[in-house]
Amino acid sequence: MNKENIIDVSNLTKQYKDILAVNHISFTVKQGEIFGFLGPNGAGKTTTIKMLTGLIQPTEGTATIQKKDIRTQIVEIKKTIGVVTEDSNLYDELSVFDNLRFVGQLYGVSKLNREKRIGELLKRFDLESKREAKFATLSKGMKRKVTIAAALIHSPQVVFLDEPTTGLDVLSGRILRAMVKELKALGVTIFLTTHYIEEAEQLCDRVAILVNGAIKTVDTPKNLIAKTNTKNLEEAFIEITGLKEEIMLVEKEGKRINV
Amino acid sequence: MFKEEVKGSLYIALKDLRMYYFKPPNLSWGIMFPIVMALAFILRNPSGVKDLASGLIAMSILFAATSAEAIVIVFERRTKTFERLLLAPLSFQAILFGKVIGGVIFGFLISSIFLVGSVIFLGVPFSNTVFLLASLVLSAFVFSAFGTLISVAVKEIFDATTLANFFRFPMIFLCGVFIPVSALPAFLHPLAYVFPLTYSVDLIRFFITGSYDLVHPAICVVVLIFYSIVLFYLSVWVLKRRIEQ
């Protein structure tokens, strides 16, 4: 069955003075899909997420999320999306519970549902013992979990995850990946950026590869591997992004240093 | 929609009050500074206490409403927590209104303490409680919106405090807080008319002494409402510009 497009991006562009951060990108994300947005550092991944979530305005082009325009209906869009940014942007001085309560209040979740939802999320993320702990006192992994819980407090239909597993230990990373799969099973659409290509290969239904602000290709990991005649998505990524030569150069330099 | 926006604003205000306002550095600027300044003038001229009350109360609102307000957004932008508010389904107006209301509540509370203190300890009379309290709220809105404007306009906390003091300190001496504007040299009068504190002092003075120094209370109300609207929407405009850039 053909699922409908939940995110529709058309010619989206962001220009910062002399820097073209995102260059006329177009793609669609289908309902219930895990869509990976991959690219080297500075490729424009975070800028794209910021435009789609209303944190910055595009210079050109537009996008719709659930048929709502990001330029004119962003407040409506924000009600149905959850965003996990690169930084854990919660309040250090508030407890885990108070942070989640405040975010729930901002999203207009009723008191009864809020308390229930916070209880569910604390249980799901194994944070019940940290309920009254100040956010500042948590480990990086714990902070990440609370940030993700905060993004899910209003049961969003689309979740943007910007580098969710960066800096996490192996176990926390695994828990997060399991959680992403669970969200997909619940019908939530996920837009994911990650540096870990292996993670994208495991999780994503389709990926877009971004280089210097422009999309090189959009396809399933399987098709990309086949098209590039490589063994895995990481090799395909290296091939597509043109990083192969740079890597060979680094390896050559490394050998020279070793000698 | 409107109800949700107002609710969101109130939650932001309550969070700010809890996190930033009732903290020692803010209390020292909001309470200690006006007390110390007032004591210096009272000791110099004990008979002029009643004339000083309106200026003291207005000054307490200015410092209480701006001291945290001018740095809160700068601080939250640094810690990325302001992004959290921008991600919420609220308009820029609702987010900044919440920020302003935090300063209004704190400014009103602190100035009420000064008002009660002036009545109990200095024997200062007042004529109309409701209008007097309303004038405190209106003044607090103007100064809190002024703090918000500074906070969205600058990038560093140091710049915010410098810019706030650049306006606050001249206002203390030019706006009739300690010396009536009419007693100042004529060439300083245009400056006094520019600053909102002049209208705040005169309005409060009217409800305490029954007379005003420079501007009729009705005009003071109109000017303070005008400043509230201009400063608030200027803050919204600056924030929008930042997002668009």
Image (cartoon, rainbow, N blue to C red):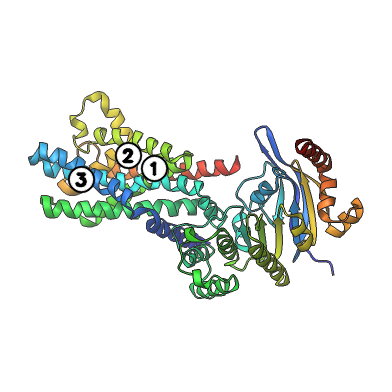
The C terminus of chain B: image quadrant = top right
Image location of residue A203, percent across then percent down = 76, 63
Q: Are marks 2 and 1 on the same chain?
A: yes
Q: Residues within 10 Å of mark 3 (few under 14, many from 20)?
A: some
Label 2: state its secondary structure: helix
Q: CA distance from mark 2 to mark 1?
A: 10 Å
Label 3: state its secondary structure: helix
Q: Which residue is mark 3?
A: B35
> Which chain is home to disc 3?
B
Decide if residue B114 is in sight here.
Answer: yes
Residue drawn 34% across the image and 41% down it: B223
- Identify the amino acid type marked 1: Phe
- Identify the amino acid type marked 3: Ile
The label shown at residue B196 is: 2
- Identify the amino acid type marked 2: Pro
> In the image, is residue B103 above or below residue A123?
above
Image location of residue B121, percent across then percent down = 12, 52
